[in-house]
Image (spheres, rainbow, N blue to C red):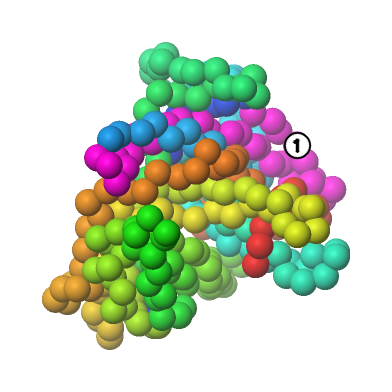
Amino acid sequence: MARGMNHIYLIGVLARDPELRYTPSGVAVYEATIAGEDHVAGNDGKERQLPWYHRVSILGKPAEWQSERNLRAGDAVLVEGTLDYSSWDAPEGGKRSMVKVKALRMEQLGYAPETTQDAGGGVRMHGGMNQVMVVGNLTRDPDLRYTPAGDAVLGLSLAVNETWKDRQGQQQEKVHWLDATLWRDLAEASKDLHKGDPVLITGRLTNESWTDKDGNKRNNTKIEATRVEALSRGAAPGTATTPAAPRQATASAARPQPSRAAASSAQGSRSGGLDIDSGLQDFPPEEDLPF
């Protein structure tokens, strides 16, 4: 498996006041919803403003330190973090999973940005930043499809490897299973990728919500890719080379997301090699996502 890369950067405002809570075992959890807008060109060439809301979390002592900063709704912040995958057995049967944003750093910006009040009483920043960069291996062959309007769309499933040392200094490893969506020229240029290929994907984080056949609310978090770089198989760890086309492509225009995009659920952080995820199993996820 390729050496994983997993980064997300958000610049936005706090949609509402952050919250500090504790798990039954006493682990501090700091949660905040960051909100902004992406400016995306559609197939017609017109720019659209697409609101986004991403809930991020910090755990352990860093959560308590962050809470002492007394950030409030409307404050502009920079969040640096990672995408974190988790899965569990649903009470009603079957598997559920989610992709969360683990904040490794949250810094207040030194200005008051222009904001918009949303229908739910929160606020979001005009503009902002919503950028994801990951490196991993494809878990299956891509399947190129076309929408009724004739737009090419390609879904990629990615396994991103993470390693760290726990409190005892032991090497730990986890695989994050992430999904990405490619559109139009980028989708067609990437159709010849294969299961096992290492790739670098950059794009923006998106959320969707819907109601399943049983009337339950479901959510999904994906990367909408704006660039895909196919890496060489067998390269030395940390070494990336790009083979000839069509395995390398850059999106000419990203597809606007539907207005049903909803806020994501997130929790977790790790700082300086300290394992602060202990205690997370003491409380269930707050939102069930499709496996």
Q: In the displayed structure, would residue 195 be above or below residue 159? A: below
Residue 88 visible here = yes
- The answer to whether residue 15 is left or right of residue 223 is right
Q: Is residue 28 magenta?
A: yes
Give the residue at x 40% y 44%: 256
In the orientation shown, which residue stands out farthest toward the left?
244
Residue 163 visible here = no
Label 1 residue SS? strand
The quadrant where residue 119 appears: top right
Expressed as whole percent of the image width and height from the top left, the position of residue 252 reads: 22, 51
Neighbourhood count class around disc 1 (C-alpha, 10 Å): few under 14, some 14–19, many 20 upward? some
Q: In the displayed structure, would residue 152 be above or below residue 73? A: below
Expressed as whole percent of the image width and height from the top left, the position of residue 162 reads: 48, 67
Which residue position is annotated with label 1? Answer: 21
**Near-viewer residue (166 or 5):** 5
**Near-viewer residue (74 or 62):** 74
**Near-viewer residue (81 or 33):** 33
Give the residue at x 25% y 55%: 251
Q: In the displayed structure, would residue 74 be above or below residue 174? A: above
Q: Amino acid at mark 1?
A: Arg
Q: Quadrant of the C terminus?
A: bottom right
Give the residue at x 64% y 19%: 121
Q: Which residues are magenta?
A: 18-45
In the orientation shown, which residue stands out farthest toward the bottom?
234
Q: In the displayed structure, would residue 101 be above or below residue 73? A: below
Q: Mostly what secondary structure, the magenta segment?
A: strand
- The answer to whether residue 291 is left or right of residue 190 is right
Expressed as whole percent of the image width and height from the top left, the position of residue 253 reads: 27, 48
- The answer to whether residue 18 is left or right of residue 240 is right
**Near-viewer residue (91 or 10):** 91
Expressed as whole percent of the image width and height from the top left, the position of residue 247 reads: 23, 73
Give the residue at x 72% y 57%: 212
